[in-house]
Image: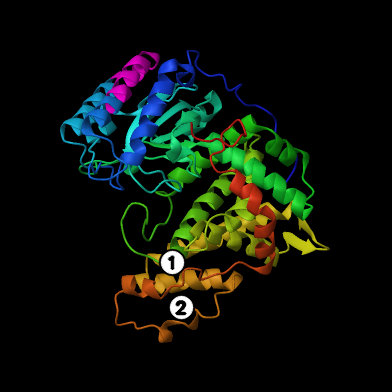
Amino acid sequence: MSENLSAVVADGTGISGDSIASHPAWVVLKQAVEAIRPWQQKDGSIDFSAEVVPPLAEVERTLESVVEAIERLSPLVPHDTAYHQALVADLRRWADGGFGVPDFLDSLLAFQPAADRRDGLQHLVVFPMYTQNGNPDRNLEAVALRVVWPDWLAELERTRYDNPLFVPITFQDFTPGYDTNSAVLFPETVAVRKAPERWTWGGIFCDREAARFRAVTAAAVDTLGVELPGDAARLIADQELSQQTFVLWDMIHDRTHSHGDLPFDPFMIKQRAPFWMYGLEELRCDLTTFKEAVKLQAEGHPMGLGVQYAILFDRLFRFPVTGERVRNYDGLGGQLLFSYLHKHDAVRWTDNTLHIDWELAPQVTNQLCAEIEKLYRDGIDRPKLVHWFAAYDLVATYLSPHPGSVWAKGPDALDLSLPPRKLVDEVLVDEFPLSMFYEALAKKLRDVIASTKGITGHGAVRTAA
């Protein structure tokens, strides 16, 4: 890799206007939402027989505080007027129904952030929802956010990487469901009576992604003694540059789930599969993004090199050692990338120092992408179970399966009279354990990874009010 990344990024100010999070009504809204959340059950309803729940009249007054705060804040975001009107109606219908299982389908359908992507545009979002990698319960949440849509990104999306549903966003402030590791705002997390026929938007918080990437990568580089090229060091040091790098990564990754030779699409068709299939799919999307970033760099685009560094560092340093070792498919993908690079001499762990061949690493990374693409292309001609075994063999070529694995013993060890979905039960929760290298790295990075919970673009760990 050559050093040619230039700091051609927006200044981050975006559209002018009063910040939602600095308005006095935001404090009222946040406090009222946070009062309601502990009263809710897992499905979002409120059980008035529970000891922690106050009388109905008090809950109604608290909900009315939520409504009044929304109505005071709504003029700051006139583009959300229709959504906020539907939201108030959904909130009041929830109260009129005795606070049963919430149904916010009407307001969800009215919220269409992908229809107006302008850099710096604010949104005030309130929904009963779970937060992915955060809170599993459908609690009421309030989020103040801004859209990130610089001109250079809009041009790439218009001319090259069409992704009309993609909405990159940053936090202003949030309630406790986002004081977690969650970095997405997805409509499918909202409590509704039925799912819409199709989803029309998906939001990703690039400031949280960038902030935790910077924190973990900096700690890993220091721990492993990696010598960074100048452009890589600047990427890690610059929050704004990292955010916009992640926006480009996310935009290409997201669209890749529906592009390519796909024997199946696990994110569009609900089906049960071994977790390495999801790991390979996520890795395929990242490596496809990497391949595109190499092309962009060759064409002189200033963001291409940064995307390559971001994918390598996040996949190698953060993914394998983040989260529990229970069907951790993102961790698996990171382990596979490291092992592939190591076996092809693009990375070496020598004298307690990690050495990266910056010229060879892109070539080898694209080579792994080609192997996964071939797996997918061949998969269209295979029965499902045969395809799963082919994928297992690809992973097991580079990662050692658990010695107690039944799948590692091959088809003869499994009851093939069972349907494939039943054979998933034979997969160990940690089918491909961490190597000794990653076990040691996980211990070294444990504290810094924990510190990124709730982190924002300001680089500070947030706590709920």
User: Which element is circle 1 on?
Assistant: helix
The CA distance from mark 1 to mark 2 is 21 Å
What residue appears at the point 52 percent right and 59 percent down from the top-left corner? 324
Main secondary structure along the magenta-highlighted residues: helix
Q: Earlier in the sequence, mark 1 or mark 2?
A: 1
In this picture, which residue range is highlighted in magenta? Answer: 63-81
1 or 2: mark nearer the eye: 2
Give the percent coordinates (x, y) of residue 88.
25, 24
Q: Indicate whether 173 appears above or below 223.
A: above
Dot 1 and dot 2 residues touching (CB under 8 Å) = no
Q: Amino acid at mark 1?
A: Asp
* Crowd tier of the residue under label 2, counting other residues whose Cα lies within 10 Å: few below 14, some 14–19, many 20 or above: many
Can you identify the residue that label 1 sits on? 378
Q: Is residue 41 left or right of residue 331?
A: left
Give the percent coordinates (x, y) of residue 304.
62, 39
Residue 319 image-quadrant placement: bottom right
User: Which element is circle 2 on?
Assistant: helix
Residue 457 image-quadrant placement: top right
Q: Is residue 313 visible?
A: no
What residue appears at the point 42 percent right and 30 percent down from the top-left corner? 143
- Residue with the most extreme left position: 97
Q: Is residue 124 left or right of residue 269?
A: right
* Crowd tier of the residue under label 1, counting other residues whose Cα lies within 10 Å: few below 14, some 14–19, many 20 or above: some
What residue appears at the point 80 percent right and 48 percent down from the top-left corner? 227
Give the percent coordinates (x, y) of residue 255.
44, 44
In this view, the residue in front, 343 or 131, is: 131
Q: Amino acid at mark 2?
A: Trp
In this view, the residue in front, 61 or 19, is: 61
Residue 333 image-quadrant placement: bottom right
In this view, the residue in front, 80 or 365, is: 80
Residue 66 magenta-drawn?
yes
Can you identify the residue that label 2 sits on? 407
